[in-house]
Structures are given as structure tokens and as C-alpha cells.
Image (cartoon, coloured by chain):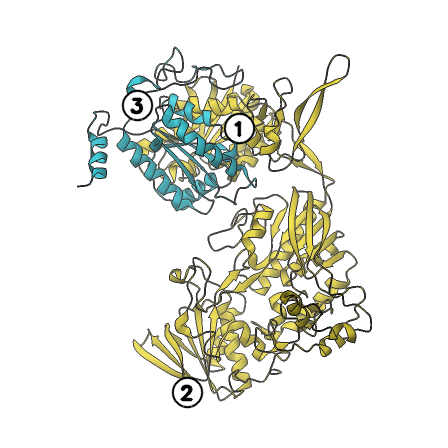
């Protein structure tokens, strides 16, 4: 057996965080023109896929502030998908290039903050790629399932934990972005 | 305080089959801020919309969430209905529980739970929606048509006859497209040129059509109603105003061995030539690649190696030093009619495709493609319409036609049906049999797809009256055998191998989009499918529109199309363009970015991020009126609402209406603890 497969088995079963009935919660930030429409096509094509993903529609991947992703982890997501138009196919000409550059940098920041980058999927899914969307969903769910629940950030959002008060934790009247920057907790680095 | 109404649609059984719609409504009724939640069988129907309108009035709703299909399907419908009930349309949002839920999951419990989540997320978003006002923008009532084939000509004529100016851009030297190369057309066998050339002349002479030939679209800026198009006029080396089309230059040119593209390579032409005798405009182009003078210049010769055409031209129209020039045109709508090209079946192929080396195309001279056969059968073709094969000029006694060469063959990279080949092969057998009545026409086919008015009758006529032999099966190899072309095939109906000693073989090669279509699609921000055909906005309800407002599709750039379909699509685009031009102003979605001047620090990161150049600098003055700084301002007419500036802004001074940070964080928070 190679090291790689040994490690992955250990990850899936070893540290006690993975349970048989664990259902990962995945938040997906997708662009309106390519991936959202591609996901629509997956629906019209009746492609069955895992039901763990919740989509947040944005006009373009260029709109995605990476604090959105941190926020999603903080609010209980076990994994995040970011998906938009293929390079050169952006509905807005170049928004996806801005997104790509940002995420090149952000991925490193994410591991610095103690989030395993494997919890974040970044992909291009065009409006004609319904099947690819189903694959992205299923692969991400399977990968995050192996990684186990992501609990490290829970409770950082202030007094109320998501489970106590899911909808009223935030006053969003101001700038609308979280005040306390999330920091990695000690036990989470592995 | 939010008063939100939630309306859950069953979509017949489409949603209710896997999602407990009543359960979704019941769960959302308990959600903070929701004052009414109800389910109904068809929310988009008139009674469904009435139900929403009544709730808006009775419950004084401040926001509406419709849990139904994709917003791409019915967002406009429900926003309009809310508007009629006096609610601002932009506080209405759709929760997509059909495409993104009921259609992709089987487990009713899981699907229902997910539908509730989706509904809650959108309810939380709507709490932060603000009423918006539509933006009104002026419309430039001129249209651009890209491509001067039959579809482009028809669209241009229809729009021009409707009273508006049209700019028609054609990349070749003449308009006419592939239709001008055809001999006769199915299913009536009328002469292609006879029906086309009058339309070409009409387009050329139309007072409201401005024609650019030997030109290409270089750049497209702007948006619906207000496009600025840069057109590259390729160096023709002939002054279009001075030239009178006499043809003296053509006669004087010494380089006469250039393959003639109009005859699909079956004849030759001079380096300076009008593409074909009926060309519109009748003005030659000097082909710099093959011209002796330009070959000499490329080698760096001190003195020009030729100059015979210039000497021959009595009008002094020839100018060797003229380079590409650029023209700028303001238009309000764009029709794309770039047509098709035939799949080149040789061995060399672009990425993702495979050739048919085993069919000998390009190696055996008597193996032709469909367009070459058209030229061979045409009265204006290289043989003057006589049926003579290219290798030795003999009359072919046996001709084999192979259908689906490339088409419906995922192994070669094309899984689609090219649609026109069944009909034109039937036509080819008839054209051949009419010229060589005692010859054999053998057709290898996979299926006969003859759907269309008079089409099936036509292909039956080829078999029953003209005696074409149809064999159901594929061909494995085509190779030269003495002066014959050997065809190895298989008859799947009688389960036997078939060998035909043919004199000529015609391959019905797949229809492909133009090779540079992706580049044009990117200039227009139009999406295309995996084969390169441009995507329509909706396959059924918006077949000639694209997802970019103001850009329309006609003819084979969208999918393989025959002539009647191309003409019908062209008429449909013209109706869309004329509809757009019927108003002086059009309304635009108000999802644009807005800068909070108090928070802006004037770094102009947004300006660097904006793909549209919508960011302007605005002066900030002190109390005495002196300029003391600059802040960003978004021009709402130019902004397209991508939001890239919002994510780029370090001081969070920009917001995108409809997708504000507040709305997105509300959605993220709503997903907590699910």
C-alpha cells in the first residue's frame, strides 16, 4: 500500500470526527450565467446528484468577496464550491479572471487560517455542462465527507451559536461584513 | 419590519413529486418575517398570479418569495405580476426548488428539507432587498448584421425594409455565402443562384443597407441599444470607388494557378480576382498570399517583381500600399449570421476532432465533399455543369455517396446530426442521374432523416423514380484501385459486406461552425456549445435571441440549418430588432453598482477591475469649492452589473444593487445550522 492511500484511510476513519451518518453541508457560490445555468441544465436533464449543496447565486464570480467563503465556513459549512464561466467565456468579459487571481492568493490564506484547502472547490462549469456540475457536486460532497465535519469556526460569530439562533445572529444594517476576523483555533491545524 | 409572502409552486407534479410543497409552505410560515405562505399547483398560471397579487394587497407585503423554477424561467413573470399589484418588482425573488432540487433528487425527505433551506435563504435575502427603479436608456436605431450569406442578407433586407439602417459585414469579397455555390436546391430543384442573386443585388442597392465586404468585426463595445462596433476593412488593394469591375486586371495577372475557393478547389483563379462572375460587389480582391509582387516583397526584393494588374487598370484603382483600415459604426442591435464551414475530413484536424484518413479525402482526387460535388453539378462550375470527374475528366459511371461523415460520430468529436446531408445527398443522386441516366448512384446511409415539407417525398423520389441504390450501413475504407475508387462497406440490413468499384465518391461531411467563431463569440459575450455553435437564450421560447441583450442569431451559426430555416430565423431576428427599435428608450435591469462617496478613498481599484470602463472620476470639493480629491462614480448606463468592482473595493464603498453584501451575508447566515 502506498502512503497516499494509507493517509486517506486514516483521514476517513482515524480521528473520530468522521461518523457514518455525517452529511456534509456545502455552500456554493456560483455565477448567474454559466454555472447557475449549467445547474439548471443538470435539472432539466434530470441528472441526480447529492442533495448536500446549497447554491447562492451571484452575477459573476468576480463579485465574490473571499470573506463570503470564510463567512460560510464560520456559519457552519463543511465545504464551499466556487464556480463560474470558463476562462475567456465570462458573460462580463473578464470577471472570472479577477476571481481566478483572487483565489490563487486566497487558497494560501485559507490554509494559514487553518481551513484545509481541500474543503474548497474552485471550478469552471459552463451553461452547457450540466453533467460536469453534477460531477463537481458529487466529488466535493464525497471529498468533504472523507474530511469530516468542520467545527473549528463555530461560535466565532458572537454570542449566539448557529444552532441556538440561526437567523438573528447578525446585524447586517451596516457595512454588511463580519466584524471579527476569523482566526484559526489551536486544535484545528491538523 | 418585513412582511414577506412565500408562494410554493407544485409545477403540476414536477416539484410536488419529490418535494412536499405543502410541508415547505408550512415550514416557511413559521419563519420570522413571513406573514403568509401558501402552495398552489401552477403558480405561474393566471389564478396563481392572482393569488400572489391578492396576498400583496391583503397582507401589505413588503417582499415576495416564489419557490418554483429557475429565475431564468419565470423571474420576469412574477416581478411583473407584483408590479401590477403595486409592489416594487425588485423585492420579488425566486427560490429555485425545481431545477436545483426536485428534478435532481429522489429522496422526498431530503429534497423537502433542501427546498425549505432554499426558501429560507431567499426569504433572508428578500428582507434586504430594496425597491429599485428601472434604468431608461436611449436606442440607436441601426443594426449590424455579421455575415452576408442567405441568412444575413434576409435579415438585413427585412430590417432595412422595416425602415432602419443596416450595416452588413461580410468577411469574403462578395456576399452570397455558401448558397451561391450550390447548383440546385432541395426539395424543388430550383437553381440556387437564380433565387439568390436578385436578393444579393437588392441588398447591395438598398438605400438603407451599408455593405462592408472583405471586412471583419474587430471589436464590439457597449450594450443593447448602444453598441460601438469597430470593423476591420482588410486590404483589398483595389479602390472600391474607382473600380468599374471590367476584369482587365484579372486577365493581366500572370499567377493563374491559385486554387479557386468558390469552386471548392476544383479550378484555379488568378491572384487578383472577383470570386465568381455574379459577385456582389463586382470588385476584385488582390490575394496577397499568392501575388507575385507581394511574394517578392516578403522575400525583401528591392524592386517589385510584378505590377501587371496596375498597368492593365485604366481607372488607376489598384493600390499595392493600402493596408487594413478601420471603420467605426454605432448600432443598437447585432444579428450574427456567420454560417457554417464543412468538416475537413483529411488527416490533419484541430484539437478535439479526428479525421477520416481511411476515406482517402485529399489523397484520392475522385473523392469529393458535398460542396465540391455541388460545383461539379453547377452550370457555373469548373465543368460548366457536365458530370466529369476531377482526375481524368471522364464521365463517372458509378458514384458512391457516403452520408454521416463526421456527423453523429462521437468518436470523431461530433455527436450531432448535421441535418442537411440526408436531403442534399438525395438531391445529389438526382442531379447525377439526370445527367448520367444509365449511371449507378449508390448511397451508404445510417438513417434517412427527411423531416420537412416535401422532404420525405423528395428522398423517396430519388430512390423510387431516379433509381438511387440506398444501402444501410457504414463504409470502412475508400482507396484508389487503378482508375477506380474502391469502396468497402457493409450492408447491415442483409448482413453482408459490400464492395463497390466506383468512379467517384462523394462524402457528406459534417457541418461545423466557422473556425474563428469562438473569437467572435467572445467579442459579443455570447456563449457557445461544445461544438462551437452559438447558444440561443432558450431552446424553445427564445430561439433567435442570445443571453446578451441586443444580440440575435440567424442561420447555421446556431446549429446546422437548411435554407428555409435560415431564412425563417433571419425574419425572426428582424422582427426582434424591429421590436427593439419601435421604442425610443428601453428599460434596463437596475442591477448596477453604486459608489458611496463618503466611504470611497479614491484608490480606483474598481476602475482597474471594471471590464466596461464604467467607472468615472468625480471631484470632491472642500467647503470653499476647491477640488481636494477624487472619488469613483459608476456610470449606470455603461455598468452591466457584474460586481467585480464590489469585490475589489478595499473600503466597501461600492454596492451592487440586487446583490449587496447585506443580501449575500443574509443568505450565508440563513444557511447556518441547516
Left or right of residue A142, residue A65 in this image: right
Q: Which chain is yellow?
A: B
The answer to which image quadrant residue B257 occupies is bottom right
Provide the chain ID for the residue under circle 3: A
The CA span between labels 2 and 1 is 70 Å
Residue B303, position as x, y percentages in the image: 71, 69
Q: Quadrant of residue A187?
A: top left
Task: Name the residue carrying label 3.
Answer: A189
Circle number at residue B647: 1
- B112 or B132: nearer the eye? B132
Asked if badge 1 and badge 3 are on a common chain, one would say: no
Label 2 resides on the chain identified as B
**Marks 1/3: CA distance?**
28 Å
In the displayed structure image, the side of residue B295 where residue B112 appears, left or right: left
- All told, the count of numbered labels is 3
The numbered mark, 2 or 1, whose residue comes first in the sequence reads 2
| Nearer to us: label 3 or label 2 | 3
10 Å neighbourhood of mark 1: few (<14), some, or many (≥20)? many
Element type at mark 2? loop
Proximity of marks 2 and 1: CB atoms separated by less than 8 Å: no
Mark 3: secondary structure: loop
Q: Which chain did the renderer colour cyan?
A: A
Q: Nearer the viewer, residue A180 or B575?
A: A180
Quadrant containing the C terminus of chain B is top left
The answer to whether B533 is drawn above or below residue B193 in the figure is above
Q: Are marks 3 and 2 on the same chain?
A: no
Return the residue found at the far top.
Answer: A159
Whether residue B126 is visible to the viewer of this picture, yes or no, is no
Report how far apart the C-alphas of labels 3 and 2 lie in the structure. Answer: 76 Å
Amino acid at each position: 500500500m502506498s502512503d497516499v492511500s494509507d493517509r486517506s484511510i486514516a483521514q476517513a476513519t482515524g480521528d473520530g470526527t468522521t461518523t457514518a451518518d455525517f452529511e456534509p453541508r456545502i455552500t456554493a457560490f456560483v455565477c448567474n450565467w454559466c454555472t447557475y445555468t449549467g445547474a439548471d441544465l443538470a435539472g432539466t436533464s434530470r441528472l441526480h446528484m447529492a442533495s448536500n449543496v446549497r447554491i447562492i447565486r451571484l452575477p459573476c464570480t468576480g463579485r465574490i468577496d473571499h470573506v463570503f467563503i470564510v463567512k460560510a465556513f464560520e456559519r457552519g459549512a463543511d465545504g464551499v464550491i466556487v464556480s463560474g464561466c470558463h476562462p475567456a467565456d465570462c458573460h462580463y468579459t473578464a470577471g472570472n479572471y479577477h476571481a481566478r487571481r483572487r483565489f490563487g492568493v486566497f487558497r494560501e490564506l485559507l490554509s494559514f487560517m487553518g481551513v484545509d484547502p481541500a474543503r474548497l472547490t474552485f471550478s469552471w462549469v459552463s451553461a452547457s455542462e450540466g453533467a460536469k456540475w453534477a460531477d463537481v457536486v458529487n466529488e466535493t460532497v464525497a471529498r468533504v465527507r472523507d474530511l469530516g465535519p468542520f467545527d473549528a469556526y463555530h461560535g466565532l460569530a458572537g454570542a449566539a451559536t448557529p444552532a441556538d439562533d440561526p437567523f438573528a445572529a447578525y446585524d447586517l444594517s451596516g457595512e454588511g461584513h463580519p466584524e471579527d476576523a476569523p482566526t484559526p483555533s489551536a486544535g484545528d491545524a491538523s | 419590519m418585513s412582511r414577506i409572502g412565500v408562494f410554493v409552486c407544485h409545477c403540476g407534479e414536477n416539484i410536488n413529486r419529490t418535494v412536499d410543497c405543502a410541508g415547505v409552505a408550512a415550514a416557511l410560515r413559521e419563519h420570522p418575517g413571513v406573514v403568509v405562505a401558501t402552495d398552489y399547483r401552477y403558480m405561474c398560471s393566471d389564478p396563481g398570479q392572482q393569488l400572489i397579487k391578492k396576498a400583496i394587497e391583503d397582507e401589505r407585503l413588503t417582499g415576495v418569495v416564489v419557490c418554483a423554477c429557475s429565475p431564468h424561467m419565470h423571474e420576469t413573470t412574477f416581478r411583473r405580476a407584483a408590479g401590477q399589484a403595486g409592489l416594487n418588482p425588485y423585492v420579488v425573488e425566486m427560490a429555485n426548488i425545481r431545477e436545483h432540487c426536485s428534478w435532481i433528487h429522489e429522496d422526498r425527505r431530503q429534497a423537502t428539507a433542501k427546498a425549505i433551506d432554499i426558501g429560507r435563504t431567499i426569504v433572508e435575502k428578500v428582507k434586504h432587498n430594496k425597491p429599485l427603479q428601472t434604468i431608461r436608456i436611449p436606442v440607436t436605431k441601426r443594426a449590424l448584421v455579421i455575415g452576408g450569406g442567405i441568412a444575413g442578407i434576409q435579415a438585413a433586407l427585412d430590417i432595412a425594409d422595416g425602415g432602419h439602417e443596416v450595416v452588413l459585414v461580410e468577411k469574403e469579397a462578395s456576399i452570397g455565402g455558401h448558397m451561391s455555390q450550390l447548383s440546385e436546391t432541395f426539395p424543388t430543384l430550383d437553381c440556387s443562384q437564380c433565387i439568390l442573386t436578385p436578393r444579393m443585388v437588392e441588398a447591395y442597392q438598398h438605400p438603407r443597407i451599408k455593405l462592408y465586404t472583405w471586412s471583419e468585426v474587430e471589436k464590439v463595445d457597449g450594450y443593447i441599444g448602444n453598441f460601438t462596433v469597430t470593423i476591420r476593412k482588410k486590404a483589398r488593394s483595389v479602390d472600391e470607388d474607382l473600380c468599374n469591375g471590367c476584369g482587365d486586371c484579372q486577365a493581366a495577372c500572370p499567377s493563374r494557378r491559385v486554387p479557386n475557393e468558390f469552386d471548392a478547389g476544383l479550378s484555379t483563379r488568378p491572384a487578383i480576382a472577383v470570386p465568381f462572375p455574379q459577385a456582389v460587389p463586382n470588385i476584385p480582391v488582390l490575394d496577397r498570399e499568392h501575388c507575385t509582387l507581394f511574394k517578392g516583397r516578403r522575400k525583401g526584393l528591392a524592386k517589385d517583381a510584378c505590377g501587371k494588374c496596375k498597368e492593365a487598370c485604366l481607372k488607376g484603382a489598384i493600390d499595392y500600399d493600402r493596408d487594413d483600415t478601420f471603420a467605426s459604426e454605432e448600432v443598437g442591435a447585432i444579428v450574427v449570421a456567420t454560417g457554417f464551414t464543412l468538416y475537413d475530413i483529411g488527416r490533419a484536424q484541430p484539437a478535439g476532432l479526428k479525421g477520416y484518413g481511411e476515406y482517402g479525402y485529399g489523397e484520392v482526387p475522385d473523392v469529393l465533399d458535398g460542396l465540391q460535388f455541388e460545383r461539379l453539378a453547377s452550370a457555373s462550375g469548373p465543368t460548366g455543369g457536365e458530370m466529369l470527374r476531377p482526375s481524368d475528366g471522364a464521365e463517372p459511371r458509378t458514384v458512391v455517396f457516403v452520408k454521416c461523415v463526421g456527423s453523429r460520430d462521437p468518436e470523431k468529436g461530433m455527436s450531432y446530426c448535421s441535418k442537411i446531408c440526408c436531403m442534399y445527398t438525395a438531391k445529389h443522386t438526382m442531379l447525377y442521374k439526370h445527367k448520367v441516366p444509365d449511371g449507378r448512384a449508390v448511397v451508404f446511409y445510417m438513417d434517412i432523416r427527411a423531416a420537412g415539407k416535401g422532404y420525405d417525398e423528395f428522398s423517396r423520389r430519388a430512390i423510387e423514380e431516379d433509381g438511387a441504390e440506398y444501402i444501410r450501413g457504414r463504409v470502412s475504407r475508400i482507396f484508389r484501385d487503378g482508375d477506380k475508387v474502391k469502396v468497402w462497406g457493409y450492408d447491415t440490413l442483409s448482413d453482408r459486406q459490400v464492395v463497390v468499384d466506383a468512379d467517384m465518391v462523394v462524402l457528406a461531411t459534417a457541418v461545423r461552425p466557422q473556425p474563428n467563431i469562438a473569437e467572435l463569440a467572445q467579442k459579443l459575450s455570447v456563449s457557445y456549445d461544445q461544438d462551437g455553435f452559438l447558444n440561443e437564450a432558450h431552446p424553445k421560447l427564445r430561439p433567435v435571441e442570445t443571453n446578451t441583450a441586443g444580440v440575435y442569431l440567424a442561420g447555421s451559426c446556431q446549429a446546422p440549418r437548411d435554407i428555409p430555416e435560415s431564412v425563417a430565423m433571419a425574419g425572426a431576428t428582424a422582427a426582434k430588432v424591429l421590436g427593439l427599435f419601435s421604442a425610443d428608450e428601453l428599460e434596463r435591469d437596475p442591477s448596477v453598482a453604486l459608489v458611496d462617496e463618503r466611504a470611497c478613498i479614491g484608490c480606483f481599484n474598481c476602475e482597474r477591475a471594471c471590464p466596461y470602463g464604467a467607472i468615472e472620476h468625480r471631484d470632491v470639493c472642500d467647503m470653499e469649492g476647491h477640488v481636494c480629491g477624487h472619488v469613483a462614480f459608476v456610470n449606470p448606463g455603461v455598468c452591466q452589473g457584474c460586481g467585480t468592482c464590489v469585490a475589489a473595493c478595499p473600503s466597501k464603498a461600492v454596492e451592487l444593487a440586487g446583490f449587496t453584501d447585506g443580501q449575500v451575508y443574509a443568505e450565508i447566515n440563513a444557511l447556518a445550522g441547516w
